[in-house]
Image: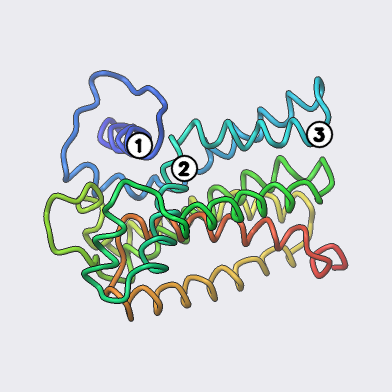
Protein backbone atom coordinates (compact mmCIF):
# COMPACT_ATOMS: atom_id res chain seq x y z
CA UNK A 1 0.00 0.00 0.00
CA UNK A 2 2.84 2.43 0.86
CA UNK A 3 4.32 1.75 -2.57
CA UNK A 4 1.08 2.72 -4.31
CA UNK A 5 0.76 5.85 -2.17
CA UNK A 6 4.28 6.85 -3.20
CA UNK A 7 3.43 6.29 -6.87
CA UNK A 8 0.25 8.34 -6.56
CA UNK A 9 2.08 11.28 -4.99
CA UNK A 10 4.84 10.96 -7.58
CA UNK A 11 2.25 11.38 -10.33
CA UNK A 12 0.65 14.28 -8.47
CA UNK A 13 4.05 15.94 -8.04
CA UNK A 14 4.98 15.57 -11.72
CA UNK A 15 1.67 16.50 -13.35
CA UNK A 16 0.46 19.25 -11.00
CA UNK A 17 1.63 22.09 -8.78
CA UNK A 18 -0.13 20.63 -5.75
CA UNK A 19 2.25 20.34 -2.74
CA UNK A 20 3.18 16.76 -1.86
CA UNK A 21 4.66 15.26 1.32
CA UNK A 22 8.39 15.86 1.73
CA UNK A 23 9.07 12.15 2.21
CA UNK A 24 8.10 11.42 -1.41
CA UNK A 25 11.39 10.89 -3.18
CA UNK A 26 12.06 11.11 -6.90
CA UNK A 27 13.30 8.38 -9.18
CA UNK A 28 12.85 7.57 -12.85
CA UNK A 29 11.55 4.12 -11.97
CA UNK A 30 8.80 5.51 -9.72
CA UNK A 31 7.94 8.20 -12.26
CA UNK A 32 7.47 5.56 -14.92
CA UNK A 33 5.31 3.37 -12.69
CA UNK A 34 3.28 6.36 -11.49
CA UNK A 35 1.76 6.98 -14.93
CA UNK A 36 -0.99 4.51 -14.01
CA UNK A 37 -2.34 7.28 -11.74
CA UNK A 38 -2.44 9.88 -14.53
CA UNK A 39 -6.26 9.53 -14.79
CA UNK A 40 -6.57 10.02 -11.01
CA UNK A 41 -4.72 13.31 -11.42
CA UNK A 42 -7.55 14.12 -13.82
CA UNK A 43 -10.06 13.41 -11.05
CA UNK A 44 -8.27 15.92 -8.82
CA UNK A 45 -7.79 18.66 -11.42
CA UNK A 46 -11.32 18.21 -12.78
CA UNK A 47 -12.69 18.11 -9.26
CA UNK A 48 -10.87 21.31 -8.35
CA UNK A 49 -12.16 23.12 -11.43
CA UNK A 50 -15.68 21.79 -10.80
CA UNK A 51 -15.59 22.89 -7.15
CA UNK A 52 -14.52 26.40 -8.14
CA UNK A 53 -17.33 26.59 -10.71
CA UNK A 54 -19.95 25.26 -8.30
CA UNK A 55 -18.90 27.59 -5.50
CA UNK A 56 -18.37 30.77 -7.49
CA UNK A 57 -21.60 30.56 -9.45
CA UNK A 58 -23.30 31.34 -6.14
CA UNK A 59 -21.46 34.68 -6.11
CA UNK A 60 -20.90 35.57 -9.75
CA UNK A 61 -22.64 35.19 -13.13
CA UNK A 62 -22.18 31.70 -14.63
CA UNK A 63 -19.77 32.93 -17.32
CA UNK A 64 -17.45 34.47 -14.72
CA UNK A 65 -17.58 31.34 -12.56
CA UNK A 66 -16.80 29.18 -15.61
CA UNK A 67 -13.83 31.29 -16.67
CA UNK A 68 -12.43 31.27 -13.13
CA UNK A 69 -12.84 27.48 -12.98
CA UNK A 70 -10.70 27.23 -16.13
CA UNK A 71 -8.12 29.48 -14.47
CA UNK A 72 -8.15 27.16 -11.43
CA UNK A 73 -7.55 24.10 -13.60
CA UNK A 74 -4.61 25.80 -15.32
CA UNK A 75 -3.11 26.90 -12.01
CA UNK A 76 -3.40 23.39 -10.60
CA UNK A 77 -1.30 21.96 -13.45
CA UNK A 78 0.90 24.99 -14.13
CA UNK A 79 -0.44 24.96 -17.72
CA UNK A 80 1.53 21.73 -18.16
CA UNK A 81 -0.66 20.25 -20.91
CA UNK A 82 -1.53 23.59 -22.51
CA UNK A 83 2.22 24.18 -22.94
CA UNK A 84 2.53 20.81 -24.69
CA UNK A 85 -0.36 21.64 -27.01
CA UNK A 86 1.18 25.01 -27.94
CA UNK A 87 4.58 23.38 -28.56
CA UNK A 88 2.98 20.81 -30.86
CA UNK A 89 1.21 23.57 -32.81
CA UNK A 90 4.53 25.38 -33.24
CA UNK A 91 6.54 22.25 -34.02
CA UNK A 92 4.26 20.63 -36.55
CA UNK A 93 3.16 23.99 -37.94
CA UNK A 94 6.66 25.31 -38.56
CA UNK A 95 8.79 22.20 -39.02
CA UNK A 96 9.10 20.02 -42.10
CA UNK A 97 11.55 17.37 -40.90
CA UNK A 98 11.66 15.23 -37.75
CA UNK A 99 14.77 17.01 -36.49
CA UNK A 100 13.31 20.47 -37.04
CA UNK A 101 9.94 19.60 -35.47
CA UNK A 102 11.61 18.20 -32.37
CA UNK A 103 13.92 21.20 -32.20
CA UNK A 104 11.03 23.67 -32.35
CA UNK A 105 9.03 21.78 -29.70
CA UNK A 106 12.07 21.87 -27.40
CA UNK A 107 12.30 25.67 -27.74
CA UNK A 108 10.74 27.44 -24.75
CA UNK A 109 9.64 30.39 -26.87
CA UNK A 110 6.07 30.48 -28.14
CA UNK A 111 5.40 31.11 -31.83
CA UNK A 112 2.46 32.22 -33.92
CA UNK A 113 1.10 28.70 -34.39
CA UNK A 114 1.24 28.06 -30.67
CA UNK A 115 -0.41 31.33 -29.69
CA UNK A 116 -3.17 30.90 -32.27
CA UNK A 117 -3.80 27.26 -31.40
CA UNK A 118 -3.82 27.90 -27.66
CA UNK A 119 -6.21 30.84 -27.97
CA UNK A 120 -8.65 28.91 -30.16
CA UNK A 121 -8.48 25.84 -27.92
CA UNK A 122 -9.24 27.82 -24.74
CA UNK A 123 -12.07 29.65 -26.50
CA UNK A 124 -13.56 26.32 -27.60
CA UNK A 125 -13.39 25.01 -24.03
CA UNK A 126 -15.16 28.06 -22.65
CA UNK A 127 -17.87 28.23 -25.32
CA UNK A 128 -18.59 24.49 -25.21
CA UNK A 129 -18.93 24.45 -21.41
CA UNK A 130 -20.92 27.70 -21.48
CA UNK A 131 -23.49 26.15 -23.81
CA UNK A 132 -24.23 23.28 -21.40
CA UNK A 133 -26.88 23.31 -18.72
CA UNK A 134 -25.26 24.52 -15.46
CA UNK A 135 -26.03 21.22 -13.77
CA UNK A 136 -24.06 19.31 -16.42
CA UNK A 137 -20.84 21.30 -16.15
CA UNK A 138 -19.60 19.76 -12.89
CA UNK A 139 -19.89 16.08 -13.92
CA UNK A 140 -18.63 16.79 -17.45
CA UNK A 141 -15.51 18.48 -16.04
CA UNK A 142 -14.81 15.38 -13.95
CA UNK A 143 -15.38 13.05 -16.90
CA UNK A 144 -13.34 15.14 -19.34
CA UNK A 145 -10.26 15.61 -17.18
CA UNK A 146 -10.03 11.91 -16.32
CA UNK A 147 -10.89 10.52 -19.74
CA UNK A 148 -8.67 12.93 -21.69
CA UNK A 149 -5.68 11.90 -19.60
CA UNK A 150 -6.51 8.26 -20.23
CA UNK A 151 -6.46 8.97 -23.97
CA UNK A 152 -2.96 10.43 -23.60
CA UNK A 153 -1.92 7.52 -21.38
CA UNK A 154 -2.84 5.07 -24.13
CA UNK A 155 0.04 6.41 -26.26
CA UNK A 156 2.55 5.12 -23.72
CA UNK A 157 1.04 1.65 -24.09
CA UNK A 158 0.60 1.54 -27.87
CA UNK A 159 3.40 3.68 -29.37
CA UNK A 160 7.09 4.45 -29.15
CA UNK A 161 8.79 7.51 -27.74
CA UNK A 162 10.29 9.64 -30.51
CA UNK A 163 13.19 11.46 -28.84
CA UNK A 164 16.49 9.58 -28.72
CA UNK A 165 18.23 11.82 -26.16
CA UNK A 166 18.07 10.86 -22.50
CA UNK A 167 17.71 14.38 -21.08
CA UNK A 168 14.05 14.86 -21.94
CA UNK A 169 11.89 15.38 -18.86
CA UNK A 170 9.26 13.02 -20.31
CA UNK A 171 11.73 10.20 -21.01
CA UNK A 172 11.16 8.40 -17.66
CA UNK A 173 7.40 8.14 -18.26
CA UNK A 174 7.83 6.95 -21.84
CA UNK A 175 8.80 3.36 -21.06
CA UNK A 176 6.14 0.94 -22.19
CA UNK A 177 3.30 0.22 -19.79
CA UNK A 178 2.47 -3.37 -19.03
CA UNK A 179 -0.95 -4.63 -20.06
CA UNK A 180 -2.00 -4.88 -16.42
CA UNK A 181 -0.87 -1.33 -15.59
CA UNK A 182 -2.64 0.04 -18.64
CA UNK A 183 -5.76 -1.89 -17.70
CA UNK A 184 -5.76 -0.30 -14.25
CA UNK A 185 -5.20 3.15 -15.74
CA UNK A 186 -7.98 2.59 -18.26
CA UNK A 187 -10.41 1.57 -15.52
CA UNK A 188 -9.49 4.60 -13.41
CA UNK A 189 -10.04 6.88 -16.39
CA UNK A 190 -13.37 5.33 -17.34
CA UNK A 191 -14.76 5.33 -13.81
CA UNK A 192 -16.18 8.90 -13.79
CA UNK A 193 -17.83 8.27 -17.16
CA UNK A 194 -19.37 5.00 -15.97
CA UNK A 195 -20.64 6.63 -12.77
CA UNK A 196 -22.14 9.52 -14.75
CA UNK A 197 -23.81 7.13 -17.20
CA UNK A 198 -25.26 5.10 -14.32
CA UNK A 199 -26.44 8.28 -12.59
CA UNK A 200 -28.25 9.46 -15.73
CA UNK A 201 -29.31 5.89 -16.54
CA UNK A 202 -28.21 6.54 -20.08
CA UNK A 203 -25.79 4.12 -21.73
CA UNK A 204 -25.63 6.33 -24.84
CA UNK A 205 -23.21 8.48 -22.91
CA UNK A 206 -20.53 5.89 -23.64
CA UNK A 207 -20.65 7.00 -27.28
CA UNK A 208 -18.10 9.67 -26.33
CA UNK A 209 -15.50 6.90 -26.50
CA UNK A 210 -15.90 6.63 -30.28
CA UNK A 211 -14.68 10.14 -31.21
CA UNK A 212 -11.91 9.78 -28.61
CA UNK A 213 -10.74 6.57 -30.28
CA UNK A 214 -10.89 8.21 -33.70
CA UNK A 215 -8.89 11.25 -32.65
CA UNK A 216 -6.32 9.10 -30.83
CA UNK A 217 -5.93 6.96 -33.97
CA UNK A 218 -5.52 10.03 -36.17
CA UNK A 219 -3.01 11.74 -33.88
CA UNK A 220 -1.04 8.51 -33.51
CA UNK A 221 -0.70 8.15 -37.27
CA UNK A 222 0.12 11.83 -37.70
CA UNK A 223 2.81 11.88 -35.01
CA UNK A 224 4.30 8.60 -36.21
CA UNK A 225 4.44 9.76 -39.83
CA UNK A 226 6.29 12.96 -38.98
CA UNK A 227 8.50 12.11 -35.98
CA UNK A 228 8.27 8.33 -35.62
CA UNK A 229 6.31 8.28 -32.36
CA UNK A 230 5.27 10.64 -29.60
CA UNK A 231 6.94 13.08 -27.19
CA UNK A 232 5.85 14.56 -23.88
CA UNK A 233 4.45 17.54 -25.78
CA UNK A 234 2.42 15.14 -27.94
CA UNK A 235 0.91 13.63 -24.80
CA UNK A 236 -0.03 17.10 -23.56
CA UNK A 237 -1.55 17.99 -26.92
CA UNK A 238 -3.51 14.73 -26.99
CA UNK A 239 -4.91 15.44 -23.53
CA UNK A 240 -6.02 18.92 -24.56
CA UNK A 241 -7.58 17.82 -27.84
CA UNK A 242 -9.38 14.95 -26.10
CA UNK A 243 -10.67 17.28 -23.37
CA UNK A 244 -12.08 19.73 -25.92
CA UNK A 245 -13.60 16.85 -27.89
CA UNK A 246 -15.44 15.62 -24.81
CA UNK A 247 -16.85 19.09 -24.18
CA UNK A 248 -17.97 19.33 -27.81
CA UNK A 249 -19.65 15.95 -27.55
CA UNK A 250 -21.67 16.96 -24.51
CA UNK A 251 -22.74 20.30 -25.97
CA UNK A 252 -23.58 18.96 -29.43
CA UNK A 253 -27.13 18.78 -30.71
CA UNK A 254 -26.55 15.08 -31.43
CA UNK A 255 -26.04 14.36 -27.72
CA UNK A 256 -28.81 16.61 -26.45
CA UNK A 257 -31.29 14.98 -28.84
CA UNK A 258 -30.61 11.45 -27.53
Q: Quadrant of the C terminus?
A: bottom right
Residue that carries the numbered disc 2 in the rendered image? 40
Residue 225: quarter of image: bottom left
Q: Determine the secondary structure under disc 2.
A: helix
Of tags 3 and 1, which is closer to the observer? 3
Distance from disc 2 to disc 1, alpha carbons, whole Å, reads: 8 Å
Drawn side of residue 152 relative to residue 226, left or right: right
Residue 38 point in image, percent of width and height: 41, 47
Distance from disc 3 to disc 1, alpha carbons, whole Å, reads: 33 Å
Residue 93 point in image, percent of width and height: 42, 68
Q: How is the image coloured?
A: rainbow
- Mark number displayed over residue 62: 3
Disc 2 or 1, which lies upstream in sequence? 1
Are there few (<14), some (14-19), or many (20+) residues within 10 Å of tag 3? some
Report the residue that reaches farthest toward the front. 112
> Going 25% across and 51% down the picture, which residue do you hit?
170
Q: Quadrant of the N terminus?
A: top left
Distance from disc 2 to disc 3, alpha carbons, whole Å, reads: 27 Å
Residue that carries the numbered disc 1 in the rendered image? 8
Whether residues under marks 3 and 1 lie with C-beta atoms below 8 angstroms apart, the answer is no
- Mark number displayed over residue 225: none
Q: Determine the secondary structure under disc 3.
A: helix
Query: Does residue 73 lie above or below 98 as drawn?
Result: above
Q: Determine the secondary structure under disc 1.
A: helix
Disc 3 or 1, which lies upstream in sequence? 1
Whether residues under marks 2 and 1 lie with C-beta atoms below 8 angstroms apart, the answer is yes
Is residue 85 visible in the rendered image? The answer is: no
Report the residue that reaches farthest toward the left. 166
Residue 31 point in image, percent of width and height: 24, 43
Drawn side of residue 242 relative to residue 217, left or right: right
Amino acid sequence: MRRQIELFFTALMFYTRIPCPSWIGHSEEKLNKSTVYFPVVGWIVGGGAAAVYWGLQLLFPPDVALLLSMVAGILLTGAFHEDGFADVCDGFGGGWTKLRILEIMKDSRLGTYGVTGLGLMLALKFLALRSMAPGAVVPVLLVAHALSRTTALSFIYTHEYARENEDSKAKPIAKKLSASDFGVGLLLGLLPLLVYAAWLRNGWLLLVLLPLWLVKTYLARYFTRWIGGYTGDCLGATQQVAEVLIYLFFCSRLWTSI
